[in-house]
Image (tube, rainbow, N blue to C red):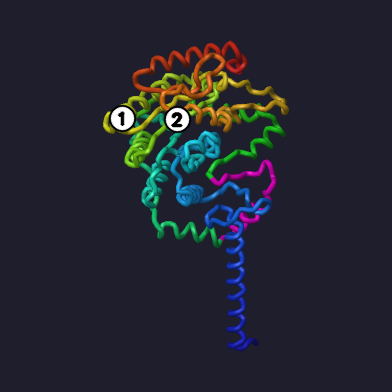
Amino acid sequence: MATPGQFRRFLAIAGGATLCGALACAALVVAIDPYRLYCMPERPGLNADKTQPQRYQYEIKTANARAAHAELLILGNSRAEIGLNPDDPLVAATGLSPYNLALAGTRLHTAREQLGALAAAGQHPKHVIVGVDFLDFPVDPAAPAALAPPARQSGLLAELPWRFDTLFSVDSVIDAVKTVRMQGAADALSMSDKGFNPLREYRQLAREEGYYPLFRQRAADYAERFERMPGALVSNAGHSSREWDALGGVLEQAVRAKARIDLVIYPYHAQLLFLLEKAGKRALFDAWKALLAERLATLQRDHPTARVALWDFSGYGARQCEAIPAKGDRNTNTEWYWEGGHFKEALGHLMFARMLAPVGAVGGAPSPEGETFGFALTAANLDANNARMARERAACVAANPALFAQ
């Protein structure tokens, strides 16, 4: 039978071994730095490529943007996260330090919190590009006003739990090992040092299955969603909504920071707009754009020195009307879209060309129909924009009738 002294020695050895193991795991996490939280050197073949975080995405991206002293911020959901690459040479030409804070599955409430967290740390952007998604705005006008999610806490004490977990946890060790193993893998899930998600895993899906099932599955998802979509943009109580309030919060914070603001209506593929038509929601989409323009006009009146622009990249132009490869076709690559809801960074480059063109320049590349990609929308030119959409739709139907017949 063990004596008390032997038992104490056993506990000391077991405790020491456990402590050494925990420290060794933490050392591995710090050395590989899978989340870019420790500013460790990035060595090709070891840890230069980083895996896409599957937890604490908000915290990690916000911390990385803060560490980078980002001056140009890209805010939005997965469409912006995947399509707007802050490493684009046109962004580099601005001379501002960029970061893509967009997060898949989030709404404008998250963007407002991100700006608030950076402001609390004393950082204020000089330029914000904000993606606004029509799909997030429709509401049931008779339903009680939805409450905003609880505000996240900021500051050192609020960061301690997730900071501890990303250092001392099995998941972090697994991500460190995955980071080492993914080096040189062309299709690995990854995130750039500026927050961009290149969606590499879709390349493998496209090679193995073709683009047709990607478009088809996304179309089925959207068709069901559009059929269930409410038919109003504001609630009867308050004549607003949680999403409009969140957008107002984002804009007010950007104005207080004296930042330039570019509000982006995403370039949905024509397939998605056609599904909106079939569901009887196209008029709601147009009304939403009009309300956006009116709200920005009000903001401009209240803040005459604010630098704010609304860009409508939606439409049926040659790029949005890109042909969908046929079923079974595994050889044809799309140039502009991964599927109907997500555009590629090649199209994002053209969006940057339009938004970042010098003041007074036309900017952007005209489409084959002669329309400039990206319409600078205001409350005064809504009819002109609707006429553009009609012209593009007619050209799209003539050029790609199969798209509207599917």
- Crowding at dot 2, Cα within 10 Å, few <14 / some 14-19 / many 20+, comes out as many
Q: Is residue 150 visible?
A: no
229 lies left or right of 346: left
- Mark 1 residue element: helix
Residue 232 visible within the image = yes
Percent position of residue 238, x then y: 28, 33
Q: Is residue 100 above or below residue 211?
A: below
Q: Which residue is mark 2?
A: 264
Residue drawn at x 56%, y 48% as measured from the top left: 54
Q: Give the camera-side residue of 268 and 116.
A: 116
Q: Position of residue 317 (x, y in %)?
A: 54, 18
Would residue 61 appear left or right of 239 to someone viewing this image? right
Name which residue lies at 54% across and 34% down.
Answer: 83
- Which quadrant would residue 107 be assigned to in this image? top left
Crowdedness near tag 1: few (<14), some (14–19) or many (≥20) residues, C-alpha within 10 Å: some
Write the residue at 48% across / 42% down.
98
Q: Which mark is residue 19?
A: none
Q: Which residue type carries mark 1?
A: Gln
Tell me the element at label 2. Answer: strand
Name the residue that disc number 1 marks: 300
At which x and y percent is residue 47?
63, 53
Q: Is residue 178 magenta?
A: yes
| First to last magenta residue range | 169-193
- In this rendering, the answer to whether 55 lies above or below 260 is below
Q: Quick one: 53 or 38, which is closer to the camera?
A: 38
Closer to us: 261 or 206: 261
In the rendered view, tell whether residue 175 sits above or below residue 91. below
Q: Position of residue 118 (x, y in %)?
A: 40, 48
